[in-house]
Amino acid sequence: MKILTLSIMIANELKNMIEQENLKEGDKLPSERDLCEKLNVQRLTLRSGLRILLQEGIIVSKQRSGYYVNKPRVEKNVFHLESTSEAIFQQGLKMKMKLLHLSKMELNKYLSAHMRLPLGTKVYELQRLRYVDDEPISLETTYIPIEIVPDLEHYDLQEQALYVILETAYDIHIDHSEQEILVSTADDFAAMSLQVAKGEQLVLQQGLAYDTKNRQIEYTESLMKMERFVYVN
Amino acid sequence: MDYRMPLYMQLKEIIMKRIEDGEYLPGEKIPSEREMADTYGVNRMTVKNAINSLVEANILYRIHGKGTFVAQKKTQKVTFYDNLSESSRGLGAVIKDSGIPLMNQILEKGVISSRGYLANKLHILKNEDVYVLHRLRNIGTESFALEYCYVPYHLFKDIDTYNFEHVSLYDYMESKGHRPVVFSQRLTILKAVQPEARLMKIAEGHPLYYFEYIGKDAKGNVVEYTESYVRCDKAKFTFRAKR
């Protein structure tokens, strides 16, 4: 067996161990020596396996202490459109939203193409920072046509989920959304908001949501910390 | 076409007409510059000029040492892993630089005895045989994705006699009555480390989609577990979700 497959195989067995033994956030992995014995491999091979787990963000290493199970990722379901707030709540994580700003603007060329609405359409620009367990994890900028949601500024966008406001106050029911997952880098503002270095790679999710009448309701660009999200179906 | 037009423009017209008529198909190789120069009794430079301008227009592309090929239409989205999504839901990938065919390079293949992890993923017993197929998928001279694919050997006893550089794995699985049709998928984005960076010829830290999926056939047998690393600069993942 070549070393390539061996390191992957060890990584896989380590993942299996974490799953089977139901290790949770903050739990310590056995020492390298014990793991070598358990998996019957050399120290070097074990480390190549551990490196894969570090890369995938499954574990973190603490100097002179060992390896620990990392925080769970926030799950985003790709079949069922639920707001991120709902997803986080279902996972039993503590979430908080901070409203950074709400303003009115006209669609420029870039946004017009993404929202499939004419240039100059008047929209609200809503920017929010999402925290999970007091850590900022995503910076979300949403655009909604003013015509559809007049007086949006009267609602509590910090405490209430946007989709709930749309449903209860405007009788708008989201039906589906088209989403793209890309990678971008943090500019000054994103770096400051998310407390990462400028130029740090971030996941960029762009999504356009339609309501039951097939109208474009909201377009959101979320800059998200790579290691904090997982897409599942 | 006017016979007084410059020769290289007339040549261009000939090639474009043949692409339009489907005589030259997307991904297919067109005659060499030398052959065309011979056929039409023109200077090789004239042929070169015609081809150059079609390459610039992204209608043709060259692979060094291999020849000139017809590109896919620019507007056509080339999708990948798209068969993994039920009725256009779920995750699929769109290749950004379409037009150039994907080529498969086999890194490793063979039967191994499963340990806990693969046994769990494939719903088989520990120590049951698993067929391993590790492939590098290239676009032209650059890597696009690295795929670690595992299938339960007992369902595919003659799998090793096929060459999956050319044969589609799903076509083969279909011929055995075990084409995967239902998938559970998981996608994260991470930074390349070794050995992926070396194998994919990218720098460490280069962003990669890490896409895992388990495929079941129509009868509900687990027929594959695949881990795929896809370059973020070469593709984007998309999905359509219902409320």
Image: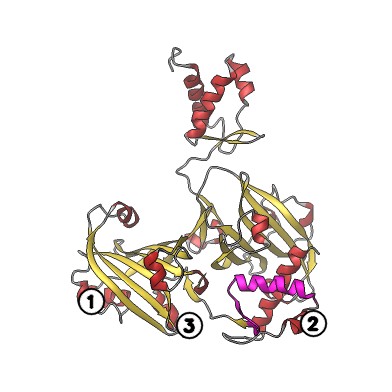
- Residue found at the far front of this picture: A64
Q: Tell me which amino acid carries mark 1.
A: Ala
Instruction: Measuring from the top left, give residue A162's x and y in whole percent.
Output: 31, 74
Q: Which mark is residue A37?
A: 2
Callout 1 crowding tier (Cα within 10 Å): few <14, some 14–19, many ≥20: few
Instruction: Measuring from the top left, give residue B143's x and y in whole percent.
Output: 62, 51
3 or 1: tag closer to the N-terminus = 3
Q: CA distance from mark 3 to mark 1?
A: 27 Å
Figure coloring: secondary structure
Instruction: From the viewer's perspective, tell me whether residue A225 is left or right of residue A4.
Output: left
Residue at the image position 56 percent from the left and 24 percent from the top:
B48
Residue at mark 3 shares a chain with residue at mark 2: yes
Q: CA distance from mark 3 to mark 2?
A: 35 Å
Q: Tell me the chain of label 2.
A: A
Q: Tell me the chain of label 1.
A: A
Dividing the picture into quadrants, the one containing residue A176 is bottom left
Q: Which mark is residue A91?
A: 3
| Residue bounds of the magenta highlight | A41-67
Front of the two marks 3 and 1: 3
A69 relative to B38, above or below:
below
Q: Secondary structure at mark 2?
A: helix
